[in-house]
Amino acid sequence: MGVLPTSPTNMDSCIEILLKCARACEESFDMSLQQPDIRERADCLKILTDCAEMCAMTARFMSRNSEFNKELCYLTMDVCQTCAEECNRFKDQHSQGCAEICLQCIDECKRIVAGMTMV
């Protein structure tokens, strides 16, 4: 049983938040490198990189209406959840902002998955 992809128009807001999340992760990574507690942020730095790459890749796949969108959304939600949890360990503005955007990304991916129809 396959999944009928959602139309690219229905995915615009998800693509937008995916790219926003990728950017927030990259910016948070850069700002985290300047923090005095850099050693405590090692895991956070790793997941920020993973999340940025995952979100950017998922946005590219969605833009071309890939048959793998559903699977990528599920994986992206997992990565974003881990990233949000890790960022929430730090109370600075960039970490908290990144965690918030990751949670928004999860919500948008859930919306896309819910809108996909089975064929």
Image (tube, helix red, strand yellow):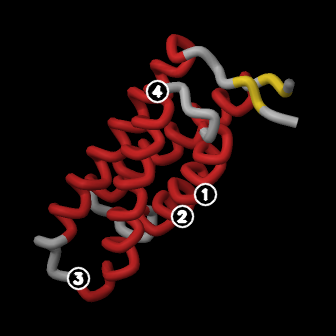
The CA distance from mark 4 to mark 1 is 22 Å
The CA distance from mark 2 to mark 4 is 27 Å
Question: Where is mark 3, residue-wise?
Answer: 37
Q: Residue at x 37, y 44 (%)?
A: 56
Q: Amino acid at mark 3?
A: Asp
Q: Nearer the viewer, residue 40 or 93?
A: 40
Q: Amino acid at mark 2?
A: Thr
The CA distance from mark 3 to mark 4 is 41 Å
At label 2, counting other C-alpha atoms closer than 10 Å, the crowd grade (few under 14, some 14-19, many 20 or more) is some
Which numbered circle lies on residue 82? 2
Q: Amino acid at mark 1?
A: Asp
How many marks on residues?
4
Q: Residue at x 59, y 15 (%)?
A: 7
Mark 3 or 2: in front is: 2
The CA distance from mark 1 to mark 2 is 6 Å
* First in sequence: mark 3 vs mark 2: 3
Quadrant assignment for the C terminus: top right
Q: Quadrant of residue 110?
A: top right
* First in sequence: mark 3 vs mark 4: 3
Mark 3 or 1: in front is: 1
* First in sequence: mark 2 vs mark 4: 4
Question: Where is mark 4, residue-wise?
Answer: 64
Counting from the top left corner in percent of width and height, residue 96 is at: 37, 54
Q: Nearer the viewer, residue 43 or 76?
A: 76
Mark 3 or 4: in front is: 4
Question: Where is mark 1, residue-wise?
Answer: 78
Looking at the image, residue 59 sits to the left or right of residue 114; the answer is left
Query: Which element is circle 3 on?
Result: loop
Discs 3, 1 touching: Cβ within 8 Å: no
Residue with the most extreme top position? 9
Counting from the top left corner in percent of width and height, residue 115 is at: 72, 22
